[in-house]
Amino acid sequence: MESPRSTGTDQELLKATLGGDEEAFVEIYRRYRDRVYRFACRMTGSAELARDVTHTCFASLLETPSRFDGRVGLGTYLCAAARNQSLRHAGRAWRERPAGSSPDLLRALGPSPLEVLLEDERARIVREVLSTLAPLHREVLILVEYEDLDLATVAEIVGAEVGAVKVRLHRARRKLRAALEAHAKSDAVTVA
């Protein structure tokens, strides 16, 4: 049987949470923890940091609920918070470490739709290329391709105009495509 809390709106649940209703907060957490965690994992390249980021985002929501003004959806707000925390926690280290390269991270994330379609070698190349992208390009590619968010939502999360998000996404996809084509050419030369 479905809990009455599971049918409440985000605003209703947040209001109830602020009134001391623990079940309401648990429902908010249940709704958004996986998205926040997956995004943080891919941004930081670390399951441990992703857990810290996820915890910080939800704790911050409880400690300073006034930051959430309701102009954007709660999921969007939490992803934006995860973005900021990921950048703050990992600093430059996450750009230098290949995303998704550790076995515990891959197990924690499970297969994404992109990884299911790609062979192991191709998925490795995609992860390597993602790790080389500039942070602004990397985050939009992750949010669009892995989290399946629309451009307007991504723009809200990263604090940019939709046009800027489109440019970043185009550049990220172009770099990814070039790397995959270069790999395919090198494989063809090796086989010949």
Image (spheres, grey):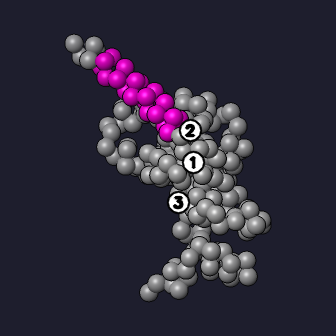
Start-end of magenta stretch: 166-187
For label 1, the crowd category at 10 Å Cα-Cα, with few meaning under 14, some 14 to 19 and many 20 or more, is many
Q: Residue at x 62, y 79 (%)?
A: 12
Helix, strand or loop at label 2? It is: helix
Residue 9 sits above or below residue 46 on the image: below
Q: What's the CA distance linking mark 3 and mark 2?
A: 27 Å
Q: Residue at x 65, y 67 (%)?
A: 70
Q: Is residue 5 left or right of residue 17?
A: left
What x and y, as percent, mark residue 73?
58, 64
What x and y, as percent, mark residue 150?
47, 52
| Residue marked by disc 2 | 164
State if disc 2 and disc 1 touch (CB < 8 Å).
yes
Q: Amino acid at mark 3?
A: Asp
Residue 171 shown in magenta: yes
| Residue marked by disc 1 | 155
Residue 32 sits above or below residue 92 on the image: below
What x and y, as percent, mark residue 155?
57, 48
